[in-house]
Amino acid sequence: MSPRPIRKAVFPVAGLGTRFLPATKVVPKELLPVVDRPLIQYAVDEAREAGIEQMIFVTGRGKSGIVEHFDIAFELEQTMAERGKDLSVLECTRAVPGDVIAVRQQVPLGLGHAIWCARAIVGDEPFAIFLPDELMVAREGGSGCMKQMVEAYEQVGGNLISVLEVPMAQVSSYGVIDPGAAHGALTEVRGLVEKPAVADAPSNKIVSGRYILQPEVMRVLEHQGKGAGGEIQLTDAMAKMIGQQPFHAVTFDGARYDCGSKVGFVEATLAIALARPDMGDAVRAIALDLLK
């Protein structure tokens, strides 16, 4: 029996973005541009590529601009049309009415709590989660991270997380899986460890900001107490589901950029600019000149 399709995705975007102040005092971090496209747009594009129809933004105060980004900007479009400007550049920002929904996370109680805030919209369906800070870029000609995960989900069902392999010296900064049997890019997950010491890490496969979860995780989160940092942790809820439902990791065939840090944001901007046919050569020349 085929698993139920993944039609909905949750984007936790209520954070304050304090590491990017003063830029994020008024502008949500998720709207900061990587070249000419906001960070949230990359995540939504990835979701659409994977066949996901409904985008659920878990927002906070001051984050209404994220939803407005996917609305029609009447004055802008009218002005551009009158001046003969190409409107196709805005096509990716258009959403079918009802396919973009926002809910509030009224208090900052962690990622698990943010996901739980979307429970009424998720309902009794499996769903995807995107952490927009993690910018996942497909290889040239390849599929995006979530599309790779959906293809794996159609084979095994259950719950899936995306992982990447990093040097063992770096594992203490991430959530790490305890791996079981592996078949190509698909690995059975026997456990999850949050920021282990290098000597205690069960593998070098780190959780990388993309999830497909069954709706039962909402029931776990509803009764879950606070964990590390005094917050309701999604990792703790997922750990309770291991052994109860199939749980696998998909090793992403592509590149990941940590746009939650300034250095990672600059790295992502350079990498994407260099790969663009309309500006790659010019940016490469600029970079080489600066490095002299």
Image (spheres, helix red, strand yellow):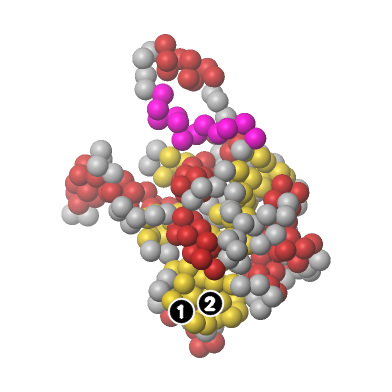
Q: Is residue 3 left or right of residue 240?
A: left
Residue at horizontal 45%, vertical 31%?
Answer: 91
Q: Is residue 98 left or right of residue 174?
A: right
Q: Is residue 43 above or below residue 197?
A: above
Front residue of 43/21: it is 43
Residue 134 seen in the current view: no
Q: Residue furthest front?
A: 1
Which of the numbered marks, if any, corresponds to residue 101?
Answer: none
Residue stretch rendered in magenta on the structure: 87-98
Residue at horizontal 61%, vertical 38%?
Answer: 99
Identify residue type, mark 1: Ala
Front residue of 50/139: it is 50
> Where's residue 81, x and y in %?
42, 15
Q: Residue furthest bottom?
A: 199
Q: Residue furthest right?
A: 223
Q: Which residue is mark 1?
A: 182
Residue at horizontal 37%, vertical 61%?
Answer: 254
Q: Secondary structure at mark 2?
A: strand
Number of other residues with Cα within 10 Å of mark 1, as a class: few under 14, some 14 to 19, many 20 or more = few
Label 2 – label 1 distance at C-alpha: 6 Å
> Where's residue 137, x and y in %?
39, 54
> Where's residue 147, x and y in %?
46, 55
Which of the numbered marks, if any, corresponds to residue 188?
Answer: 2
Q: Is residue 146 above or below residue 79?
A: below
Which quadrant is the C terminus positioned in?
A: bottom left
Front residue of 259/177: it is 177
Identify residue type, mark 2: Glu
Q: Secondary structure at mark 1?
A: strand
Q: Earlier in the sequence, mark 2 or mark 1?
A: 1
Task: Determine contact: label 2, label 1, CB under 8 Å.
Answer: yes
Number of other residues with Cα within 10 Å of mark 2, as a class: few under 14, some 14 to 19, many 20 or more = some
